[in-house]
């Protein structure tokens, strides 16, 4: 038995509907095999035109068939001859659904590591990873308010060891700030008072301080005069320390 001849009605129907209807439906209408319909379409120069709109498989919403809404997909297949052919298509799900599916997959993997369900994932993740990501692990177990206040001091150079030592240092600093008189430096480190800062500036004998003692401005005095005055002040201080009276 040879192949059935193609009538005008069959050819017109194939020209109108090829690419618009699935080839399986065309085969049922024409009462022909799939290979016969595909070969006839190739001879007539008909090609399957992809629709401009594509439905997402997960959310089932129509989107235009572009890179803005769908990710690219590369398919490698073998021909009858054995050659590898590459096809460029789009993925079945849109970009939004594809991202959501990826997040769900990562959460499932993490739930296996944490030994928890998906509903308990947030609590388990916070317990394990929130404290491990701390810059200073000595602050583990403290509240956010305490951590923030201690971190400011640690960034400036303070060394935190225990909460008990930190409370002692805080009480010492508060007592020093409230004192009216300076009783000397103890066994602990402390900040200098304003009185000590002023004393250090006077001892340094900078150009501005020397000119101030002379009663002149820095711009009105030469460098040689400033150095002479500085030497005189230093001599006076040495004589005073040795209890030598100056006439």
Image: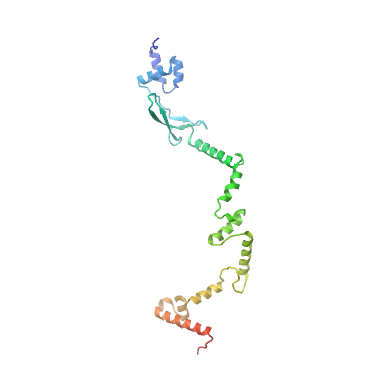
Tell which of 102 and 47 is nearer to you.
102
Against 220, residue 61 (above or below) is: above
Residue 101 visible: yes
Is residue 26 shown left or right of residue 103?
Answer: left
Q: Quadrant of residue 105?
A: top right
- Residue 160: x, y in percent? 58, 60
- How is the structure coloured here? rainbow
Residue 222 visible: no
Q: What residue is drawn where x is 59% and y is 55%?
A: 139
Q: What residue is drawn where x is 53% and y is 75%?
A: 199
Of all residues shown, which one is farthest toward the top?
A: 1
Q: In which quarter of the image is residue 174?
A: bottom right
Is residue 217 shown left or right of residue 171?
Answer: left
Against 151, residue 195 (above or below) is: below
- Residue 223: x, y in percent? 40, 78
Tell which of 235 and 207 is nearer to you.
235
Of all residues shown, which one is farthest toward the bottom?
A: 247
Q: What residue is drawn where x is 61% and y is 55%?
A: 145
Q: What residue is drawn where x is 57% and y is 50%?
A: 132
Of all residues shown, which one is farthest toward the front?
A: 82
**In which quadrant is the N terminus drawn?**
top left
- Residue 56: x, y in percent? 49, 31
Q: In which quarter of the image is residue 148?
A: bottom right
Tell which of 218 and 103 is nearer to you.
103
- Residue 165: x, y in percent? 62, 62
**How many numbered badges does the structure rendering display?**
0
């Amino acid at each position: 038995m040879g192949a059935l001849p193609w009538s005008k009605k069959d050819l017109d129907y194939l020209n109108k509907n090829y690419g618009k209807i699935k080839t399986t439906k065309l085969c049922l209408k024409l009462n022909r095999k799939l290979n016969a319909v595909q070969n006839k379409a190739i001879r007539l120069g008909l090609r399957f035109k992809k629709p401009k709109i594509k439905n997402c498989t997960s959310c089932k919403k129509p989107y235009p068939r572009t890179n803005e809404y769908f990710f690219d997909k590369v398919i490698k297949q073998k021909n009858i001859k054995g050659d590898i052919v590459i096809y460029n298509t789009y993925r079945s799900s849109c970009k939004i659904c594809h991202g959501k599916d990826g997040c769900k997959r990562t959460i499932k993997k993490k739930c296996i590591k944490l030994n928890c369900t998906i509903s308990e994932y947030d609590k388990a993740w916070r317990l394990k990873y929130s404290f491990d990501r701390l810059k200073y692990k000595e602050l583990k177990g403290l509240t956010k308010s305490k951590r923030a206040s201690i971190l400011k001091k640690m960034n400036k150079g303070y060394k935190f060891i225990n909460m008990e030592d930190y409370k002692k240092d805080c009480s010492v600093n508060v007592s020093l700030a409230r004192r009216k008189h300076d009783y000397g430096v103890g066994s602990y480190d402390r900040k200098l008072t304003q009185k000590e800062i002023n004393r250090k500036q006077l001892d340094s004998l900078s150009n501005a301080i020397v000119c101030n003692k002379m009663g002149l401005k820095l711009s009105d005095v030469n460098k040689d005069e400033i150095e002479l005055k500085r030497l005189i002040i230093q001599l006076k201080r040495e004589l005073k320390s040795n209890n030598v009276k100056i006439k």
